[in-house]
Amino acid sequence: MSSQALVEIRDVNFAYDSRPILKGVNLTFPKGKVIAVMGGSGCGKTTLLQLIGGALRPSSGYVKVDGQVIHELDHKGLYLMRRRMGMLFQFGALFTDMSVYDNVAFQMREHTDLPEEIIRDLVLMKLNAVGLRGSHHLMPAELSGGMARRVALARTVALDPMLIMYDEPFAGLDPISLTVVGNLIRRLNDALGATSVVVTHDVQESLKIVDYIYFIADGVVVAEGTPAEISSSDKPFVHQFVHGEMDGPVPFHYPCGDYWQDLNLRPWR
Amino acid sequence: MKRTTLDLWVGIFVVAGLAALAVLALKVGNLSTYSMSETYQLQAHFSNIGGLKSQASIKSSGVLIGRVAQISLDPERYEAKVTMNIDKRYQFPKDTFANILTSGLLGEQYIGLIPGGDEEFLKAGDEIKKTQSAVVLEDLISRFLYSKAEDSKQLNK
Amino acid sequence: MTIVEHLRSLGHRIVNAVWRIGYTSRFFLLILLYSGISFRRFHLTIKELFSSGVMSLIIILVAGLFVGMVLGLQGYETLKRYGAESALGSLVALSLVRELGPVLAALLFASRAGSAMTAEIGLMKATEQISAMEMMAINPIARVVAPRFWAGVISVPLLSALFSAMGVFGGYVVGVVLIGVDQGSFWSQMQAGVDFQHDIVNGIIKSFVFGVAVTAIALFEGYDAPPTAEGVSGATTRTVVESSLTILFLDFILTAFMFQGE
C-alpha cells in the first residue's frame, strides 16, 4: 500500500501559536482514489490541506507527497511540487478581475510557453468538461455560485495535476449543483488518473462519490473506512455526524459554567 | 475593457504627463535659457558679494549672457571667489569691469559686465581683475549719515 | 498593578511597532526583488497604470485647475498691496512646482488610487485569491503586488506634473484673463523665478519619493489586512491616514534638504 501512496501524513502535530490543531494524525492517500476528510467545523481539515500544500509547516512529523517531504523542500522545489497540485478553495477563489476564460488560462499562461491557439483549445476543453464552455466570456461576478465552483474546478485541473485538493467543495450549493460538482470530482479524478482529497462536512454527498473516509475530531483521526463501513458504523461520534444529530459526543453547548449561576438565579429546591 | 483601448488610454496618460513636464520645464521654468549652447568659465574676486547666489544671472547691457557657477571664499585673500559660466558666443576684453548689481530696490542680485577697451580678449579660466563689490545698504546709509553730519558741522562753523 | 499593566501594554506596542517595521521593510524588499516580471511582461503594469493613473486623471486635472485659480486670486490680492502684481506668475508657479503639485497630487492619489489598491488586494486576500495563486505556484508579490507598485511609482510624478501644469493654467486664467495682469510679465516673471534644476527637478524627485511611499503603504496595508470585511475597511482607512501623514512628513524632510541655505 505504501508504495502506491501518493500522500503520506505521519504523526503530524500542528499548533497555531499555542493552540493545538492537529495532534499526531496519520493519513494515507493511495494513488487514483478519492478520499474524504470529514469533521466538524474548525477541526483542522483546512489546516491539513495547507500542510499538504506547504503553506504551513508541521510542528512535528512530516507530510510526504510523491516521495518528497514537503517541509524539507526549498522555495523552488515547493513551487515545482505545487505545479503538480491543484486546489479548489472554499468559495472558488476565482480571480475577480479576469473573465472565466482568463481564469482557466491563467496557469497555462504563467507556467507554460504554449501559443495562444493551443491555450484556447485547452481552456475550451477544460470548460467543456465542467459543462461551461458557453460561459467563457463571462466575468466571475456574473456567475451563480454553482457555476463559479465549476469554473474554479476547471481552473484547478488546468494543468492536469496529480493531486487535487478540494476545500469544502459543496459549501453553499443548491442540491442540483451539489450533485453536479460531486459527480465532476469523481469523473475528473478518474479521467485524469489523479488523486483527490475532499475536505468536507457534507456527509451524504461524499458518501456517494468517495473511496475512503477519514473522520477528524479534536485534532485526531477518530474513525476511518469505506463509505459502507462508515454508514453502518456504530461509533457514537460517527453516528452523530452521519445522521446529523444535535447532541452527542459533540455537545450542543460550548463549554460553560452553570446556567443558573450565569443568570443569577437559584434553582427551586 | 479590451487591451487595445486600455493601452491607448495609458498611452494618452503617459504622453500627457510627459507633455506637462515639458511645459513646466520650458514654459514655466527657465530650461529654455539653459540652452546656452556652450560656455567658458571666468573667475572674479569680490571683497563682498552681498546676496549673490549661484545660478544668478550675468548680464551685459541688460542681456543675459551667463550664470554664476560657483561661489567660494578664497582662503588666502579672504575674498569671495566667483566662477562664472559665460556663453561662448560672447567675448570680452581683458579690462572688462565686473559689477554686482541689484535689479530694482529689493530685487535679486546679478553680475553686470562692462566691457573695456583692451584689444585682447579674456580666455577660458582667466580672471576679471577689475571688480566692484555689492552695494551693502547698511554701508550706504551710514556713509550718507556721516556726510550729513559733516555737512551740518560745516554749517555750524 | 495598573502601572505595571500600562508598562506592559506600552512595551507590547513598541515590540509590535518594531515587528511591523521589520515586516514592512521585508515586504518592500520582496517587491523590489520580484519586480522582474512587471517589466518583462509590461502589459501587467500597463493594466495597473490604467486603473491607478488614468482613472486618477480627472480628479487631478480638476483639482489642479482649481488650486491654480485660487492661488491666482489669493496671490493677486496679496501682491497688489505691495504693487507687485507682475510677480503673480512666479508666485503661482513656484508654489505649485515646489510644494502643492507634488504634495496635493500625492494626497489625491493616496485617497483615489491608494485606497483602491488596498481594498482590492485586501479583498483578493479575503476571498483566497492570493492563497489560490500561491497554491498555483505563482508568487502573488511578483504577479499582483509588484506591477501595482511600479504603476504607482510611474503614475505619481506624471500626475503631479499634470497637476502643476493645470494649476499654472488656472493661475493664468484668473490672473491674466479675468483680472488682467499683464501677460508678458506673468510669463517672464514666472520663467525668471522658476529654476529648472532647483525647482522643477526637485519637485519631480519629491513626487517620485511620495509615489514610492504611498504605493508601498497601500500595498502593504492591503496585503496585511485581516481577511474580513472589517479588516479590509480598516486597512483602507489606515492607507489614507498613514500615507497622508507620511507624505507631509517626507515633504518636510525633503524640503529641508533641498531648499536650505543657498
Image (cartoon, coloured by chain):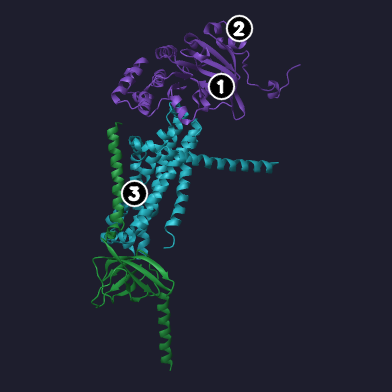
Chain colours: A purple, B green, C cyan
Q: Which amino acid does label 2 sit on?
A: Asp
Q: State left or right for residue A40 relative to residue B9.
A: right
Mark 1 or 3: in front is: 1
Instruction: Provide the residue designation for mark 3.
Output: C161
Identify whether B23 is placed above or below C155.
Answer: below
Instruction: Provide the residue designation for mark 1.
Output: A44
Residue C21: x and y in percent read 52, 42
| Residue C78 - label | none
Mark 2 or 3: in front is: 2
Which residue is depicted at the point 33% across and 40% down?
Answer: C54
Subunit under mark 2: A
| Residue A234 - label | 2
Between the C-alphas of marks 1 and 2, the distance is: 24 Å
Subunit under mark 3: C
Seen as rendered, the residue at the extreme bottom is: B157
Q: What residue type is labelled 1?
A: Gly
Check the picture and name the quadrant holding the C terminus of chain A: top right
Labels 2 and 3 share a subunit:
no
Asked which quadrant contains residue A103, the reply is top left
Question: Between A48 and C259, which is closer to the camera in this rendering?
Answer: A48
- Residue B104 seen anywhere in this rendered image of the structure: no
Residue A68: x and y in percent read 50, 23
Q: Which of marks 1 and 2 is nearer the N terminus?
A: 1
Q: Which amino acid does label 3 sit on?
A: Ala
Residue A179: x and y in percent read 43, 11
- Residue C188 seen anywhere in this rendered image of the structure: yes
Which residue is depicted at the point 42% across and 78% down?
Answer: B139
Identify whether C248 is placed above or below A88.
Answer: below
